[in-house]
Amino acid sequence: MLYNIKRTKFEYLALYFAEDIKFMNVKKIVEKMTLKEKLQQLTQLNAGFLDKNAGTEATGPLSSMGLTSQDLNGIGSVLNFQGPDNVKAIQRQHLEDDTNKIPMLFMMDVIHGCRTIYPVPIGLSASFDPQLVKDCCAMAAKEAAAEGINVTFAPMADLVRDARWGRVMESTGEDPYLNCLYSRAAVEGFQGDLKKGKVAACVKHYAAYGAAEAGRDYNTVDMSERTLREYYLPAYKAAVDAGVEMVMTSFNVLDGVPAAANKKLVDGILRKEWKFGGVVISDYNSFREMITHGVAENEHDAACLAVNAGNDIEMMSATYIGHIESLIKEGKVSLKQIDKAVERVLKLKKKMGMFSDPYLDADKALADSLDCCKEHRDLARKAAEKCAVLLKNDGVLPFSTEVKKVAVIGPFANTGEILGNWRCYGKHEQTVTVLAGVKNLLGGVEVVYAEGVSGELTASDESGIAAAVKAAKGADAVILTLGEPQGDSGEGNSKLDLELPAVQYKLLDEVLKANKNTAVLLFSGRPLAIKRLSETAPAILEVWQPGTEGGSAAANLLFGKAVPSGKLTMSFPAKTGQCPVYYNHYNTGRPRMNDDVRVAYTSSYIDGPNKPLYPFGYGLSYTAFGYSDLKLSSSVLQSGGTVTASVKVKNKGSVAGEETVQLYIRDLFGSAVRPVKELKGFKKVMLAAGEEKEVSFIINEDMLAFYGPDLVKKAEKGDFKVFIGGDSECADSVSFRLV
């Protein structure tokens, strides 16, 4: 091995740490640093630049960025390093080379698991369970910390309304209230108090990255400040309020200015208005992309815009190192700005305890012991069960466990590639496949398998369908896996068409001819346009990209060992052309009143409905829930007071089930147009067969507040409707007046 890491921590500290470092006087450390050293602290590079074994980044790429080998000695942070031993070796080498002996931060995209992979966030959000999200993030942090990772680029708090966007899989959907809960839960799970087994969280992408025009990644965002504040900013604010240590600026233009150059957004709203005192980091190479955007003529201008907007760390470019010194001489940037940025970075390192132990939790033995261990697998399986959404069931599910023969068919039946994008260190070979999950559950039952067709977007080969049909014939139950591969979602993977490939529909048609007792397991990292599937398949269970225990969870759900309870956090379009489609939209002056009947000169399509195929909040169970006796404690809400809304929920079926009871409110008249419905609360209730419970919600004035034309958030007196039901299309309502 190139590096010697045998010295004890205490020997190392005695040898290397200067007096100010030992006492962690951040201001004094900064005072002693040269300007070049400060700028190095504000620069983040990829692992290849520092891994001397790699040898690939230290020649052409290094010089093309305007960096020298000496610049690497003081680099403040690095991303995408793998393995605790490598982390320790690189950290030790860095501290030997760095004049100031300041440890580096190691950062990684730990999005939905580290080694043990949980469902992708859009799937996990369907649990309507912030505590579950917190638990999954905490487990991921524990594994990540053992790997030597100090910071995760998560949560992604971007509100998303367009399923064409590839990064839907990282989001928690289309609702700002729900996104706030999940953003807070993720920060608390990953970060906590930053003690042992935790990592610093970095909320992203600030701001409104999920609103890219046409759902095309990196594209322009243009919206009113009222819309920005009402829908897109709250989840970032929730993360800040939860104590998130870092914020990442986004790639997109907002109001004509790239987010990383947007002083109002970063210095104004984030720093001054929200009082965020942590570290702001750019996204990958986004400072240099200001030139491509056309707001900076060169790197010199880009560096000026970035630092004056309020960015601290520059990821994977070197405009700071190359140009800040001259910008200071020109009076366009002050040394005080740079000092403050460095102080924020060092304060984070101090808070994490890196000055007393630069390796923190990095430990190969610990990392290996946590690797898909039973506790983490159990949580992964529970999460995959809780997030699955039953979209359709014509009495096919659950299958009986008394079956003699089961056919498992399709491109996602016998593959570990169901982890989802951004899977960190997750391994396909450690993943429980659907085929393995079914076999494990059913024991000696005959289980036959046929792939049928490839899951690739461009697949057209039908030669395997005959074998699939053969497998389906004579089976007591057929499990047909359809959807999109994990690589079809994620960064840069926007889609024009959200339909299933034609070859998958061919497989579906032929399998159904052979055996009607078929249930479709749908794999995806986003909502899909599956109108034809919904009209054809007897049962559809959306399992997203379910993670390490996906196959076990799927088997439990299909055979009734677990009951589906997931609810959609993003609407499924009937056609791709509906996108963006979302429940909390405004009425127009000419709304379509009946989706089944089109009236000319209304806001509608001539060739289809306005409504999505499956709305926000939708999800079936193996039982049925009835709602009755919706009422309010008063028809008048006094300013500063409360009103209680309640409803009776009954399990009308023969098996126990969990229902997510959802509260929606509509403001009928306001100084600005208000949405047709807004989610304001939800409660999960477990009901035995035949059991009935009353579920209540307290409504207060704060829940009715919104940003008016003056951009002041407040509730306005007037009339409101209250809806409580199982999804966003619940129709029964009661009314009250705020006075």
Image: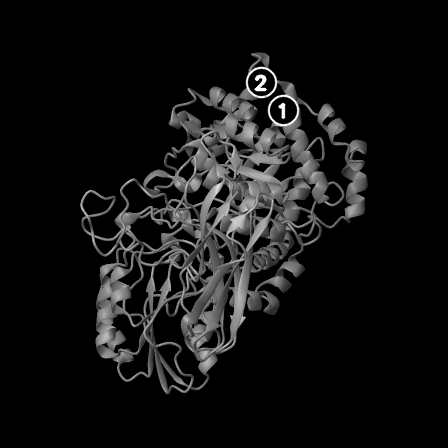
Which comes before the other along the chain, label 2 or label 1? 2
Residue closer to the observer: 144 or 235: 235
Is residue 110 something one can see in this rendering?
no
Left or right, 110 with respect to 720, comes to: right
Say whether marks 2 and 1 touch (CB < 8 Å): yes
Left or right, 296 with respect to 130, comes to: left
**Looking at numbered disc 1 in the image, what kind of residue is underneath it?**
Ile
Quarter assignment of residue 615: bottom left
Q: Around disc 1, counting alpha carbons within 10 Å, would you say few (fewer than 14), some (14 to 19), or many (20 or more)?
A: many
Q: Is residue 440 above or below residue 160?
A: below
Residue closer to the observer: 168 or 174: 174
What element does badge 2 sit on?
loop
Q: Is residue 490 above or below residue 445?
A: above
Q: x, y percentage for residue 278? A: 63, 36
Which label was assigned to residue 338? 1
Q: Residue at label 2?
A: 333
**Looking at numbered disc 2 in the image, what kind of residue is underneath it?**
Val
Q: Around disc 2, counting alpha carbons within 10 Å, would you say few (fewer than 14), some (14 to 19), or many (20 or more)?
A: some
Marks 2/1: CA–CA distance: 8 Å
